[in-house]
Amino acid sequence: MYPIWEVPYLSSALVIGLIASFHVLPSHLAVGALWVTVYIEKLAYSKNRPDYLDFVKRFTLLLLIFSFIFGSLSGIGIWYSATVSSPRGISGLIHNYVWGWATEWVFFLIEIATIYAYYYTFGKVDPKTHIRIGYLYAIAAWISMIIITGILAFMLTPGKWLETGDFFDGFFNPTYFPQLFARTFLMFGIAGIYGLVIASTLKEETKLDLTRIISKTAFVGMILGGLFVIWYAFKLPQTAKELYTGLPYLSKLGKIALVCYLILSLYFLLTGFVVPKLNNFTLSFIFILVAFLGILCAEGIREGLRRPYIINYFMYGHQVIARDLPAKNIKAEIELIQQEGLLPRLGYLPESLRKITPENRLEVGRIIAFHNCANCHSFTPKGVRPLPVLLGKLSPQSPEDIDAFLSALSTFPYMPPFAGNDEERKVAAEYLFTLIKK
């Protein structure tokens, strides 16, 4: 076990979620943009509309800056925060999908090379060659999504991998194709929002023409994407469906995400088919924020449905292996830790904290509590699922009351069982009781 990353007022998992939700905006723009852009470029040549090319150049520059600077930085942020928040979880993904990551990075390098080539060869190569460069980028970006989706979907629905440990059994899991097609079509909606922002800066005639084209494409993408989201919901395991209905915050996130989806779809319907003049810079920019709110809620639901696991049914949120995986010679750890204790596995601790003594009980209790709870809870009175407030609602009269609650964690379907022996659980309860007293 590795040291625990404490994030005041937040949880370490929420930091990953916030960065990842933002990352969806530039990453899905990167996948969807060039399909629309190249189509408009072809229209510019076939209809002799050089004014369309001004949009293509501006949109490509936005893609270059937003997706390949802010998108790359947020991608690095995901890797960093995931590594320090859940080192055993990210290690499990890397060991199982190292060749998947490597393949994805190859196509990401192709994206980087071709987007620069596409932007800087405007007017310097013939139109046919330039369009081919655009399609090369678009295909590479979509293949990148094909690979990443397999790994993301695996974390919620590992499928037969739990028995075989096979790369492809985990990759082509029960929710892979619904999620891939949902993301593929919804990316046209995300790209459409940015496209409308750029179109709103052009002269009136060009703005109206391109608003219709972009909005129609985005509207079709939103409708098809929504249908595949429904398919995705049907493919979820029963435990995930029960969590969604049983945890009020997940159903609230679902309602907010649905409202954002309907607002965006209605906007595309109006600007594409009814009132293209409705599109303006301020309104389109506001809808980028609406899209982000919807994505934040949707990603929150996807992450929440895995509780209490990092990798569903295999690794708990506190990074303890939940079950045997004979195919990879991996043994379940939770029962062993409950017998032998968690402290022997914390090799980073100084010698003075490796055994519980009367002098270090609270400090060791703090460490044990953080290992068990910090991934999902804050230890401050205010914040994300704050432990002092939640435990205070139990009205405990002594540390023994907290200890009794910790020993019964496995009765809650969204909580992992306590990782530690009886003595470690007692000192963790003593520390948590001091938080309530404060």
Image (cartoon, rainbow, N blue to C red):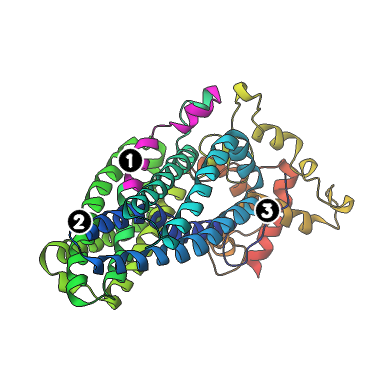
- Which of the labelled discs sits on residue 369, or is there none? 3
Which residue carries the number 1 mark? 232
The residue labelled by disc 2 is 46
Q: Can residue 387 be seen from the camera position used here?
A: yes
**Marks 3 and 1 close (CB-CB < 8 Å):** no
Give amino acid for label 3.
Answer: Ala
Residue 288 percent location from the top left of the image = 34, 67
The answer to if 338 sits in the magenta stretch is no
Circle 2: residue type: Ser
Q: Nearer the viewer, residue 208 or 343?
A: 208
Give the mark nearest the N terminus, 2 or 1: 2
Image side of residue 326 versus residue 428, left or right: left
**Mark 3 or 1, closer to the camera:** 1
Classify 80 as above or below 409: below
Magenta span of residues? 164-184
Under mark 1, the amino acid is Tyr
Secondary structure found at label 2: helix
CB of mark 2 within 8 Å of CB of mark 3?
no
Residue at disc 3, secondary structure:
helix
Q: CA distance from mark 2 to mark 1?
A: 39 Å
